[in-house]
Amino acid sequence: MHPVILHFGAFKLPAYGLMVAAGYLAAIYYIFSRAAEAGFKKENLSDLVFYSVLSGMIGAKFFYAVTYWDNFGADLLSRAAYVLRTFQYGFVFYGGLIFGAAAFYLAARRRGMNPLTAADLCAPALALGHAFGRVGCFLAGCCHGAPASGFPFSVVFTNPSCEVAPALLGVPLYPTQLIEAAGNIIIFSLLHRALGKKRAAGSVIALYAALYSVQRFLIEFLRGDDRGVLRFGLSPAQLISAAAFAAAVILFFGLKAQNEKN
């Protein structure tokens, strides 16, 4: 599609980076707009977001490197050089989510905040920012779908500088990036409504984990890029999705039991 939005001399503005930045700003705006209502100070939330985003980027890149390590070169030095050279792209969302969540929890505890309450506030923003990111994936051609012969809403990539494999240029593909972006907008809307109701701390983030894991598990069947080594016929992302869904269900029942006890 349009992997580079603006090209002026040696300067290039990548579409993916631009959309990720837009998603980050949209998420920040949402969190800050709801901060006072949720009983949080903006400066405390700023620390949470900063450390979570930084750790999330490291985790996303780490998971990408682990998943596709054997494809980066013939030896350790060449593989490490490839990871550093291509740092501007190549991220695994679940890696960023896991590392970011760990940093979020530690930062919240350090600030004396309830991690589950803070996570509930940030859950809709996470879905909103992710939707922007998936549009960036679409523009760059990464995370693309498999050939979709006869599918009425297929998309065709023709730009040789995009991330689609050369063999798939000009071939109708499932618009997996746009499907996931639309799904994230729907999840955002549901979480936003849930956040406005009085619920047990942790219920909104649990709902996010359940909804997104189901969406991601299903969309993986339509992906046409390299999904990593399959286990039991499932991609690494699908296995993580199954684990995330199980964790969300356990958290739901735990919160329900706690409410009944109280």
Image (tube, helix red, strand yellow):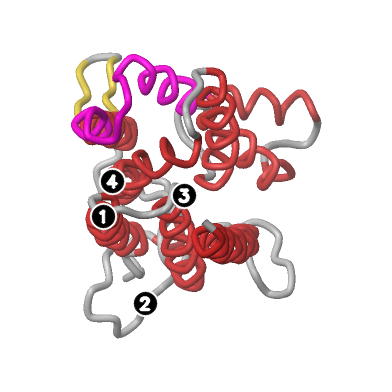
The residue that disc 3 covers is 202
As shown in the figure, which amino acid type bears the numbered disc 2?
Answer: Ala
Percent across and percent down for residue 38 are: 29, 35
- Neighbor class of circle 1 (other Cα within 10 Å; few <14, some 14-19, many 20+) is few
Q: Earlier in the sequence, mark 2 or mark 4?
A: 4
From what the image shows, is residue 141 above or below residue 256?
above
- Asked if disc 3 and disc 2 are in contact, CB closer than 8 Å, the reply is no
The residue that disc 1 covers is 197
Q: At numbered mark 2, what does the secondary structure look like: helix, strand or loop?
A: loop
The answer to whether residue 185 is seen in the rendering is yes
Q: Earlier in the sequence, mark 3 or mark 1?
A: 1
Percent across and percent down for residue 79 are: 71, 31
Instruction: Report, in whole angstroms, how far the alpha carbon at label 2 lies from the one at label 4.
Output: 27 Å
Residue at the far bottom in the pictured view? 150
Instruction: Report, in whole angstroms, how far the alpha carbon at label 3 lies from the one at label 1.
Output: 13 Å
Q: At numbered mark 4, what does the secondary structure look like: helix, strand or loop?
A: helix
The residue that disc 4 covers is 128
